[in-house]
Amino acid sequence: MKKIALAVHGGAGTILKSRMTMELENEYRSGLRAALEAGWTILQRGGMSLDATEAAVVELENNPLFNAGRGAVFTHDGRNEMDASIMDGATRNAGAVAFVRNVKNPIKLARLVMEQTEHILLAGAGANEFAREMNVESATDEYFFTDFRYQQLLEARRQHKIQLDHTADEPELIEESESPKTKSQIPNPKSQIGTVGAVACDVRGNLAAATSTGGMTNKKYGRVGDTPLVGAGTYADNNTCAVSCTGHGEFFMLAVAAYDVAARMKYKNSGLIEAALETVDYLRDIGGEGGLIAVDARGNVALPFNSEGMYRGFVNSDGEIIVEIYR
Ligand code: ASP
């Protein structure tokens, strides 16, 4: 029996403690914890790493704090277009969707692409048609409407910027409020971080990785980032590792970042932690802010990033959940 392992992320970027209220920090922490619990329960019962990563990502997609599923950012036209991918390290099969709309959990659709079609990546209207055929749960535009995300779009439009969710310009204070939290009190859009992911190793030593995102605020022309691209945002191979990335997608695509970790292990014989660190250092060198989570078949976990922070968590060898945000 192999050592089981699980890690999740909720995005990397400029996350400063000075901008966070205690209440909000606790909400992020409990969101990550809930995702780890969902995945860990499956792994502990001897379940598959694929199921564990999917369950962890669904939990994060349902949480409006994170830029995926319900909390997805807005495109230039005020829509939510989401990307997701999942990869099975045992079969090295993968499934992905790009700019899907009104799908409650894009990661479930990505898995169906992997299991029910002969394709890897379905995009746009076709992906939505596939979602209807598969009867996956849909959600209304209102479900995805988050006021602070909309404000983020208006600001990005005003500045004629395609705003990376994790790019902070000026520090802004988050106001504390006595009133019950509304979606608009979810944090300063500029410090809000996006994309969620999970990686796991199950009792059979099978690895899996899953990643889901709303992409970039104010994105146009059907922009797709690294998240749905196998090898860039997500990768899994039992012989090396499972990886889920978050950060400035264009650079992760240029670096073929997720596969880069696996390639360093495969061709250089690097260990997981060394390989993951080298990839993140390389990303920094080419200007790519962000981070990644990775596991290998021995249950080792790596969570490196080159940004101010990364919402992240893993379950340690004693079965204890560790959640971290800052450097
Ligand atoms: N990598 C994602 C993208 O570029 C964004 C993120 O990780 O926050 O679409």
Image (tube, helix red, strand yellow):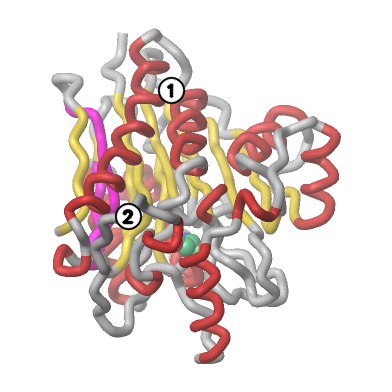
Direction from residue 61 to residue 203 in the image, left or right: left
Mark number displayed over residue 249: none
Does 287 sit above or below residue 236? below
Q: Which of 195 and 278 is in front in this view?
A: 195
Quadrant holding the N terminus: top left
Does 206 sit above or below residue 239? above
Q: Which stretch did the figure color magenta? A: 302-316
Residue 188, visible in the rendered structure: yes
Residue 18 pos. (x, y %): 15, 68
Residue type, mark 1 in image: Asn
Specify few, some or many for label 1: CA neighbours under 10 Å numbering under 14, 14-19, or 20 or more: many
- Membership of 281 in magenta stretch: no
Residue 162 pos. (x, y %): 54, 80
Q: Which of the 4 image quadrants contains residue 95?
A: top right
- Membership of 311 in magenta stretch: yes
- Total tally of numbered discs in the picture: 2
Q: Mark 1 points at which residue?
A: 206
- Residue drawn at the location 40% of the way across and 25% of the way down: 38
The span from disc 1 to disc 2 (Cα, nearest Å) is: 46 Å
Q: Is mark 1 within 8 Å of ligand 1?
A: no
Q: Mark 2 points at which residue?
A: 179
Q: SS at mark 2?
A: loop
- Residue drawn at the location 35% of the way across and 78% of the way down: 287
Q: SS at mark 1?
A: loop
Specify few, some or many for label 2: CA neighbours under 10 Å numbering under 14, 14-19, or 20 or more: few
- Residue drawn at the location 69% of the way across and 58% of the way down: 99
